[in-house]
Image (tube, rainbow, N blue to C red):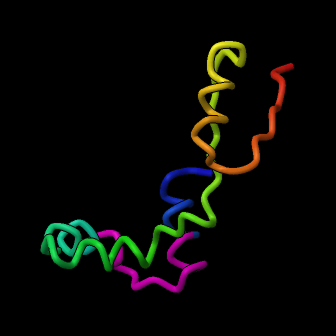
Amino acid sequence: MSAVGGTVRSIITFELDDRYYDTYPGKVRALTLEQIPAAAAEVVHPDQLVWVIVGDRAKIEAGVRELNLGDVKVIEAS
């Protein structure tokens, strides 16, 4: 899908204003330091995050498990 197609799809799927992407950068720049935690809480939900970590399993697995980010599922490259 092209970038334009993806943008249009997002606007339709999430029922965004047609000028959403034109006005978004200005809205972000207008946030004050006091407003940022509340804005982040609306879109970042740590309990729903999925981490994808790629690397040499022998070198990183123990350290990744020590982070205690949740269940670890190993998918071998084919």
Outermost residue, front side: 66
Rendered location of residue 25, percent (x, y): 23, 66
Check the image and report above or below for 46 versus 75.
below
- Res. 60 image quadrant: top right
Rendered location of residue 64, percent (x, y): 62, 33
- Res. 72 image quadrant: top right
Where, quadrant-wise, is the C terminus in this rendering? top right
Check the image and report above or below for 53 versus 12.
above
Is residue 12 part of the magenta span, yes or no? yes
**Residue found at x 60% / y 58%:** 49
**Residue found at x 40% / y 85%:** 17
Check the image and report above or below for 49 versus 77.
below
- Res. 33 image quadrant: bottom left
Is residue 49 part of the magenta span, yes or no? no
Viewer-proximal residue, 63 or 54?
63
Rendered location of residue 69, percent (x, y): 62, 48
Q: Which residues are magenta?
A: 10-22
**In the image, 75: left or right of 37?**
right
Viewer-proximal residue, 23 or 76?
76
